[in-house]
Amino acid sequence: MSNYIVNVTNVNFDTIVLKNKKPLILDFWAEWCSPCKIFLPILEEISKEYKNSLQIAKVNVDDCKEITEKYSIQSIPTILFFNNKKFISSHSGVISIQELKKLLHLHFNIT
């Protein structure tokens, strides 16, 4: 996993997600999830390209049931977008890097 992606747990969730000053993508995933494995290289590429303007964090749904339930995650991968420390939108399923960049522009005005 990229050095620019942070693992979120029940313990560090508030610090990493809710107190983060950068726009943030929170990825819900699991070890056994094939689509999650397909999506990981896309997130890694985005994390490197936008390291100065965006934070990417990952939540393992098997390890963090509280967070998963709090955001009503029904399928994985699901990404949540946070800006100004607030949840703004979500997207479920694997998307291309081009589609993710469109969402970054839409939600964060990042190009």
Image (tube, grey):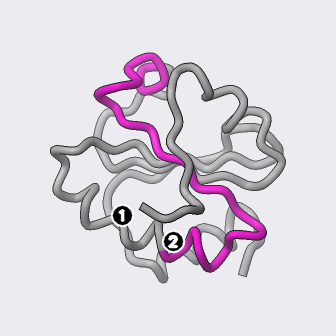
Asked whether, in this view, residue 81 is left or right of residue 2, the answer is right
Asked whether, in this view, residue 43 is left or right of residue 65, the answer is right
Question: Which residues are the magenta region?
Answer: 45-69
Indicate the position of residue 55 as horizontal and vertical percent values. Answer: 66, 56
Q: Which residue is mark 2?
A: 100
Query: Residue drawn 55% across and 62% down?
Result: 3
Q: Which residue is mark 1?
A: 40
Residue lying farthest front? 3
Query: Residue drawn 62% across and 79% down?
Result: 49
Confirm whether the magenta stretch covers residue 99. Answer: no
Is 72 or 66 nearer to us in this picture? Answer: 66
Q: Earlier in the sequence, mark 2 or mark 1?
A: 1
Mark 2 residue element? helix
Q: Which mark is residue 30?
A: none
Give the crowd class for mark 1: few <14, some 14-19, many >=20 residues within 10 Å: some
Q: Quadrant of the C terminus?
A: bottom right
Q: Is residue 20 above or below residue 44?
A: above
Residue type at mark 1?
Leu
